[in-house]
Image (cartoon, rainbow, N blue to C red):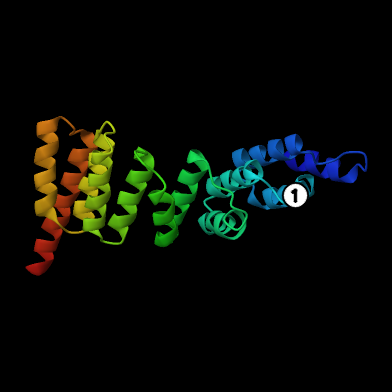
Amino acid sequence: AVLAIFEEALADPDTEITESLGLALLAACATGRDAGLASRVFEALTPTYGNAPDHSAYAALIRVYHACELHEKVCDIYEQEMVPRSIKPDSQIGEAIMKSAVECGRSTLAQSIFSASSGDVSKHVAMIKACSRECNLQGAMDVFARLKESGVAMNSMIYNSVLDACIQCQSPGQALDLFEQMKADGFVDVVSFNIMLKALLRQKKQIGRAHV
């Protein structure tokens, strides 16, 4: 249906791909996860902005690519299109860009987006996970400390991300200490127990292999 509407608009010489129509089509592409159509819509929409799309246009396209898990494209749009035009992403789009940067291993980009945030829980958690994937436990702990110092209300999701980082970075002793702290502070939940259980099972497998 979205494709039919778009092609009908293109075929009609009296119909213009206006900003409102273009953004609506891109929103539909995000819902339908149609990256191919989104790129065509964006191209047709660009002249409306005098060939200089603004934040709303780039944000709509990024939402599509992020929904389609085309993380490299998300990062490229930001670095190659938005940055040169000094277009700063809002909080929601900034989070999407940072998550995409984490997913495709562009740690420098993730760090640059993260550095602009303060007290943003989701961005801090994403950064902790990024450090965990790189086996950078100290980096994860630094992000955790920064979040605590910001004065934001802590919760189980935050602590669990750090707990998982300890396990992923093969620091069971630190994980156990953090788990005890979480119990004392009332932040342990089902996810916390699952993380510790997985760590225990992994440790038993490693011991079993060592004895084979």
Left or right: residue 16 versus residue 40 is: right
Q: How many marks?
A: 1
Q: Residues within 10 Å of mark 1 (few under 14, many from 20)?
A: some
Q: Residue at x 73, y 40 (%)?
A: 22
Left or right: residue 57 versus residue 14 is: left
| Residue furthest out toward the front | 86
Whether residue 124 is visible to the viewer of this picture, yes or no, is yes
Q: Quadrant of residue 76?
A: bottom right
**Residue 197: % across, % down:** 16, 45
Instruction: From the image, tell me which residue sits under label 1.
Output: 46
Nearer the observer, 212 or 117 = 117
Nearer the observer, 39 or 87 = 87
**Residue 168: % across, % down:** 23, 56
Nearer the observer, 109 or 32 = 109
206 lies above or below 186: below
Whether residue 1 is visible to the viewer of this picture, yes or no, is no
If the image is split into quadrants, where does the N terminus sit? top right
Q: Quadrant of residue 211?
A: bottom left
| Residue furthest out toward the left | 211
**Residue 200: % across, % down:** 13, 50
Callout 1 amino acid = Thr
If the image is split into quadrants, where does the C terminus sit? bottom left
Secondary element under disc 1, as helix, strand or loop, is helix
Q: Residue at x 64, y 41 (%)?
A: 56
**Residue 61: % across, % down:** 63, 47
Q: Residue at x 42, y 55 (%)?
A: 112
Q: Residue at x 13, y 66 (%)?
A: 209
